[in-house]
Image (cartoon, grey):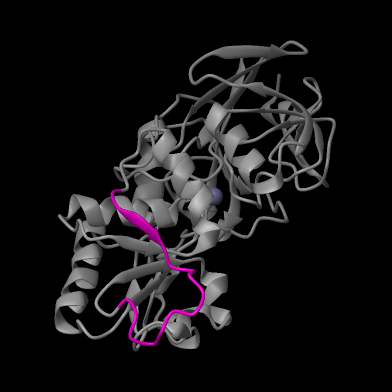
């Protein structure tokens, strides 16, 4: 079977007609396979959902127990047949529970990577390269200018600022699923064991990560009403980026605005958000990691989706690997 017959972009998302299922559909469908819990990939309202245990749990935390009609757990490495199409989930290294989905029929195997990264992450399983005929890669940071610095060094910059400005609350914006927990785990790895204060919007997901065995240390709620201005001087407070638009971030002692995101590489973005200390910490591959991954997997063909599709397509072609952009719509890298 030709790969483009096995899986192709349809208005609701990537569709497998033979198996009659979608992967990360952007509208409610009969049968959805979900790569990970970020809201642009995992939406509520599907009749049937197949995903890892963690992704299903995360969807239930975010949308409530009735987020879909019925659900089925996909165990990593275990093949499930859907109308004669073989699907297997493999770790993607993006956030807790994130998976690549391998779709196989009549001798053709396509791997949909969802979102992925290659760096070690204390909060999730590492990316596993899977040999395939077609590798569908994301391209969030798909330009040669994107280089993500060392995570530990970025966290050290935050710790140095704490020592330098002990009178200021260090208020960090980090996405609620993945980034916040990874930042906390990275701080612990760097030997920071003080209590870390979290916005209420992060509490359930942090609790869930802990229940999955990820040590986040001493976490305290930073949403106590009536907190005075001098509160949390010299402490780290983490909240979702949306909280910075509210009064929330301004209640702390001389708040120092920090944002942890791959996009902090772009000074203009940091400036626009009024970020004083941008931390470049990403849950996606940078350019070198994207191209190294394609070299390592050596697929017959590459399809590129969400992000800077054209540059990566061009790079593949220059390497002699057939490649094309998928032009899928509706993905906005929530976790970044
Ligand atoms: Zn994601």
Q: Does 115 sit above or below residue 242?
A: above
Residue 4 in the image: x percent, y percent?
71, 32
* Total marks in image: 0
State the extent of the magenta-drawn residues as a range. 217-232
Q: Is residue 317 left or right of residue 287?
A: right
Quadrant of the rendered image containing residue 251: bottom left
User: Residue drawn at (36%, 33%), measured in percent from left and top?
Assistant: 213
Quadrant of the rendered image containing residue 149: bottom left
Q: Does 300 sit above or below residue 85?
A: below
Q: Does 30 sit above or below residue 142?
A: above
- Which is more toward the observer, 151 or 240? 240
Q: Residue furthest front?
A: 226
Residue 74 in the image: x percent, y percent?
59, 21
User: Residue drawn at (32%, 44%), measured in percent from left and top?
Assistant: 121
- Which is more toward the observer, 280 or 124? 124
- Which is more toward the observer, 216 or 50? 216
Residue 219 in the image: x percent, y percent?
35, 55
Q: Does 58 sit above or below residue 47?
A: below
Q: Is residue 30 left or right of residue 199?
A: right
User: Which image quarter is the N terminus in?
Assistant: top right
Question: Is residue 109 within the magenta segment?
Answer: no
Residue 134 visible, this angle: no
Q: Main secondary structure of the magenta part?
A: loop
Question: Is residue 222 within the magenta segment?
Answer: yes
Residue 273 visible, this angle: yes
């Amino acid at each position: 079977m030709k790969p483009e017959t096995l899986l192709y972009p349809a208005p609701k998302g990537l569709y497998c007609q033979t198996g009659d299922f979608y992967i990360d559909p952007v509208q409610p469908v009969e049968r959805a396979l979900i790569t990970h819990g970020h809201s642009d990939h995992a939406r509520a309202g599907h009749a049937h959902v197949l995903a890892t245990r963690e992704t299903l749990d995360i969807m239930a935390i975010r949308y409530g127990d009735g987020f879909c009609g019925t659900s089925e757990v996909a165990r990593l490495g275990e093949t499930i047949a859907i109308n004669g199409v073989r699907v297997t989930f493999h770790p993607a290294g993006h956030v807790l529970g994130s998976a690549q989905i391998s779709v196989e029929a009549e001798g053709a195997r396509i791997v949909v990577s969802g979102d992925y990264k290659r760096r070690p992450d204390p909060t999730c399983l590492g990316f596993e390269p899977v040999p395939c005929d077609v590798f569908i890669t994301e391209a969030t940071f798909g330009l040669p200018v994107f280089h993500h610095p060392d995570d530990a060094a970025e966290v050290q910059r935050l710790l140095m600022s704490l020592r330098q400005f002990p009178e200021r609350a260090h208020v960090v914006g980090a996405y609620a699923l993945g980034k916040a927990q990874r930042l906390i785990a990275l701080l612990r790895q760097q030997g920071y064991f003080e209590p870390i204060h979290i916005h209420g919007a992060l509490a359930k997901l942090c609790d869930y990560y802990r229940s999955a065995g990820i040590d986040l240390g001493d976490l305290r709620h930073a949403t106590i009403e009536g907190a005075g201005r001098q509160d949390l001087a010299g402490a780290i407070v983490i909240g979702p980026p949306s909280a910075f638009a509210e009064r929330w971030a301004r209640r702390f002692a001389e708040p120092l605005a920090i944002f942890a995101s791959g996009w902090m590489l772009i000074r203009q973005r940091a400036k626009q958000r009024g970020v004083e200390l941008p931390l470049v910490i990403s849950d996606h591959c940078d350019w070198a990691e994207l191209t190294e991954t394609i070299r390592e997997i050596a697929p017959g063909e590459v399809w590129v989706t969400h992000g800077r599709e054209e540059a990566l397509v061009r790079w593949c072609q220059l390497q002699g690997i057939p490649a094309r952009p998928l032009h899928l719509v509706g993905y906005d890298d929530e976790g970044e």
